[in-house]
Every structure is written in C-alpha cells, then in structure tokens.
Image (spheres, rainbow, N blue to C red):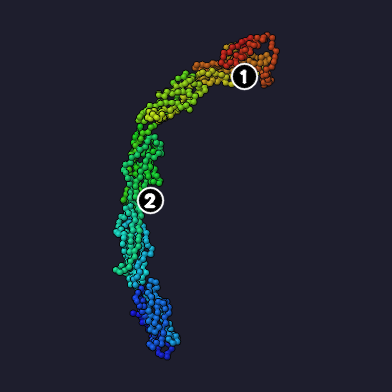
Amino acid sequence: SGTVLHRQRTGKEGQVLHRSKRGWVWNQFFVIEEYTGPDPVLVGRLHSDVDSGVGNIKYILSGEGAGTIFVIDDKTGNIHATKTLDREEQAQYTLTAQAVDRDTNKPLEPPSEFIVKVQDINDNPPEFLHGPYYARVPEMSNVGTSVVQVTATDADDPTYGNSARLVYSILQGQPYFSVESQTGIIRTALPNMDREARQEYDVVIQAKDMGGHMGGLSGTTQVKITLTDVNDNPPKFPQSVYSMSVSEDKVPGEEVGRLKAKDPDLGDNGMVSYRLIDGDGLSMFELSTDSETREAVIKLKKHVDFETKRSYTLKVEGSNPYIDPQYIAWGPYKDEATIKISVEDADEPPVFVAASYTFEVEENAPEGTAVGRVHAKDTDVANNPVRYMIPLYTDIEQFFRVNPEDGMITTTRPLDREAQNWHNISVSATEIGRNPALVFCGRGWMRVDIRVKDVNDNPPEFATNNEVLMCETVMPGRVIETVSAVDKDEMAHRQHFTFSLAPEVAHNHNFSLKDNRDSTASVYVLRKGFSRLTQDVYFLPIKINDNGVPAMTSTNTLTIRVCSCDSRDTILSCNVEPYVLPPGLSTGALIAILACIVILLGRHMKLIWIFAGAGIP
C-alpha cells in the first residue's frame, strides 16, 4: 500500500491565507528495495484539500528521480516507483510536490518537499575488507593471548533490523585458536603450542549477519598465524661420544675435527657457545667456533707424539649464551659431550739423540782421523735402520766423510787451523726400509760444528816493518828500535816471545839486544862514528822463540840503514851514495858481503855469515 498525502486548508474562505497555516500531511514514505514484482510499486498519494474531485487540479512531481524512477498520476496524485531500488546505492530521495490549476498551470499551493526512504532488506553479506590477515604470536603463549583482531563490514542498514548485526565464529583453526563473537579478536586456545612442532596455522573466521541466526548472510576471511620463536629448547649434542684422530706429523693450528650441538630455536635463541671443560688433552688441543657453520672446531695446540701418548680425551660443553628468564626453569640450557682423540703414527724422520754436536780435531792430523760420532734413531714403531751422509753443499771442499752405518765422522786430509779454524757441516740421517722405491722415506738433519785445534806449527816473526833508520851521529847506548813478534798459531795463556842475537853476531861491536821479558826486545847502539859513506846498511839477525809446545824458533833480520841527520837528529837523507872503497876492502870481500845479503833474504833458512874485511863483527 502507498502513503496518502493530503493538503488541508486552515482559515476561512476569503481570508488572507498564511503559508504557516497550511501544509502537506503525510504518513509513510517508504519503498522496499530490490522489489521485483510485475507492476510498479505505489509509493504514496498526493492530495490537496482544494481538490474537489472534478479534475481541475493537476499534480506535479519534481526532484531526485522524478520522471525516471518516480512517476505521478497528475489527476489522482498517485506516485509509483518504476525501477528496482537499491538502498546501498541510494538510501533516500528528496522530491517536491505541487498542485496547479489544470487550465492555467497556476500554482494553487506552494511547493512542498518530502522524502522517500528506501527500506532495507538483508541483501548484503558481511565482507572482510582487509583480509587475508597475517599475524604472529610467541610460541608457548598462555591461553587467551590476543593474536589479532579481524573486522567485517555489512552494507545493510545498521539502524534497521539485524541485517548488519554481525557475529564472528571460527570455522578452521580449532582447537588452537578461538575468536570473540562480538569483537573478532582471535586468541590462543591451547597451552604450550610449540613452534618446533608446528610453526604456521591457517585459520578461517566467519562473520554472519542477522545476529548469527538462521537465514543470515555470512562472509569469511583467511588468517595465517605464525608462532614466533622463544628460547625454550636447550642445545643437545647428537652423540655423547665423538671419535677423532690426528697424525703425529700435524703441526699446531691444524684442524682435528668438528662437532655441533643442535638447538631447534632460531637466531640468538638457538646460538650455542662451546668450551673445553675437562680431559687430559686440554694442554694439547684448543677449541674455536666456526662463525659461519657455528660448529665447534677442535685444533691441535701442541705437537703430539704417537710413541709417547697414543690417545687423549676431551670434554666439551655447548650452552646457550642468551637465556629467556621466563623459561629458565626449563633448563639447564647446556649439554656435554666427550671427544676421544687417537694419535696416528706417521713416518717421522730419524731423530738425533743429541740436541747439537760440537767436535774438535787437531790440525795437521792425518787423513782418516776420527772427529766424532753422530747418532740418530728411528722413533717409529718399525725402528728401521738409519743411514748417514754429509750433503755436499755443507762441505764443498769435502774435508770430512761420515760412515753411513755408524755415523763416525773422519777427516779426508790434514786440516790447517790458520786457513780455517771452524768447519760447520750438516749430517743427514735417512730412514731406510719402509718402501724400497723411496730412498728418502724420512730424513732428519743435524748441524755439526768442528773446531780445528791449534798445533804450534808456525814460527814467530817480526810484528812490524823490519827496517830501522839510524843517524850517523847516534851516540852509544841509544835505543834505536824495540822489536815485537807475532805468531799465526793461537796464543795460549801466558805464552810469550823471547829474543836474542843470532850466534854469529852475538859478539859484534856495533849493536846489542836486550830482551825486555814482555815479548819485546830493545836494540842498542854500541859505538859511535857511523858513516854512511863507509857503510850505509847493517843487517842484524835476531832469533825469536815462541816458547810453544813444541817450541818454534825463527831468525828474522833487522835492516839498519845509516842516514845523514841535522843537529836535531832529523833525518835528511838515507840514499845510497857512491863512494870509493877504502884501502884493504878487496873485491873478494865485497862479493862475500853481497852473498851474505842474499842468504839472509831466505826467511826460514839458517843464516850463514861470511865475514871478510869490514863487517858487523
């Protein structure tokens, strides 16, 4: 049925009409949405109290939808809706009604507005505009912990009936989660949900209108809930005992083995720190952590020796450095494992029994003289025989040889200490027998220092130049030279030189010699009146004894040259000047003197003097 609208006049005919005194009177102005009947829907009827029913009044409708959605019968004032209306598209329409004279079209009444409201029906299901949802909640959360709130909307009129009154329920995800029916808040429903057992849950939430009653429309949304990690698991070694091995030829720093404690927690919660806490191998091995794999790496700290100790034991602890106080009662957050390390035998080179070798041998010792013996042994279980050799590059001139079987070092020829007093050679010890195809299956090396002991085999000689310049005017008793000596042999403690004139000049009248008992001797002048014109050179043979064992003696000649000097004994000239031989100096005497000079030039020969005419004696 429609709504009847009629116009009522107030006041008496002929009186001035006031608009405030008259108006439209209406009842219901509703039209049901989504009407699909065969005939247009009667919305209402306009009627004016000036309408006497004779057809002289014309009703006019204007405003929203007038003429398209809403049409009016200009005679009866009936308003019909010609199209299906959707409240969610437009909830109401504002229209204007007016009555005019049919003949003149003059308004009989002022226009008046009225509203046509579209009456809601439950034709829209709830919708989750923000779905699907993704939420996270810590594992092991208490029952009732809020996870996420889902919200649905309903396009129906919330002010009319229950079309937009929503109720939430869970269709999938029980018994793990629940949802509050009025708020859409999802909460945990089970205690001790463990991420390590199951990490993700697919939950389906339904929103139903009409207060959830039968006949209501519904909509659903997906909620993916992920359990986040907490540190609720201690680390655990997969094995209680680990076996490892290391060869005795490995060097410190090399890796022996790895192990890893498993912790199903994530990130810092699953991080494990390792340390060695016990065992007889604490001083021999060390532990580090691989930063990428988070494995405990066992490395060699010191050399191991199969022949000394063949196995070691370590105890390693793995623990969580980050512990959640909320779950500390679930601990302890650590585990232990035992590592058994066996030492493997390696084909080690022979080892010399001494840390170093230093030998001595006398110089001039004959070929084949024993110097000393080196000894090496195979420390391996096989205890193979050892052979010795001297590498050529350590004894290029091959002064020595070594017996390949017993390690005895001997000389190949006499040695001269004054040429080389130390010889530094190497001896290699080679293990033979483990693999015939490999001559050098193991080799050890040892340096051998050989000192050549001194033998007094070098005579002493003048330490400095053996020529002296002497003024002609020198006075008797004057020291013209102090001589000293050197010896290529080693100077033993308290060893000293003694000096004396050679027997053949022991009684000459020109010069004398005094031993100063401090390995020096002084040469004195015995007379005056030297003249270089008469004789410009004198040769004085001096005997030197080194007092060694055995003692070595040599005769060294001191040359004394006569020079012309001024009054201050400053030498002016020592050149040989020609002069006439004095009477009595025969040619034969001169030849004898020259022969003597030649003989004196021989360094280690016995000095023979031939005196004739003028000489030193």
Q: Which residue is mark 1?
A: 467
Q: Give x and y (percent) for residue 520.
A: 56, 19
Point out the image quarter for the C terminus.
top right
Residue type (three-letter) at the residue carrying disc 1: Glu
Relative horizontal placement of residue 211, taking residue 405 as reference (left or right): left
Quarter of the image where one finds residue 199: bottom left
Quarter of the image where one finds residue 531: top right
Q: Is residue 39 visible?
A: yes
Q: Give x and y (percent) for residue 523.
A: 60, 17
Q: CA distance from mark 2 to mark 1?
A: 97 Å
Is 439 in front, or is 171? 439
Crowding at mark 1 (Cα within 10 Å: few <14, some 14-19, many 20+): few
Quarter of the image where one finds residue 448: top left
Q: Give x and y (percent) for residue 424.
A: 47, 26
Residue type (three-letter) at the residue carrying disc 2: Gly
User: Which residue appears at 62% of the width and 12% of the height?
Assistant: 595
In the image, which disc is placed on residue 295? Answer: none
User: Which residue appears at 57% of the width and 12% of the height?
Assistant: 503
In the image, which disc is placed on residue 267? Answer: 2
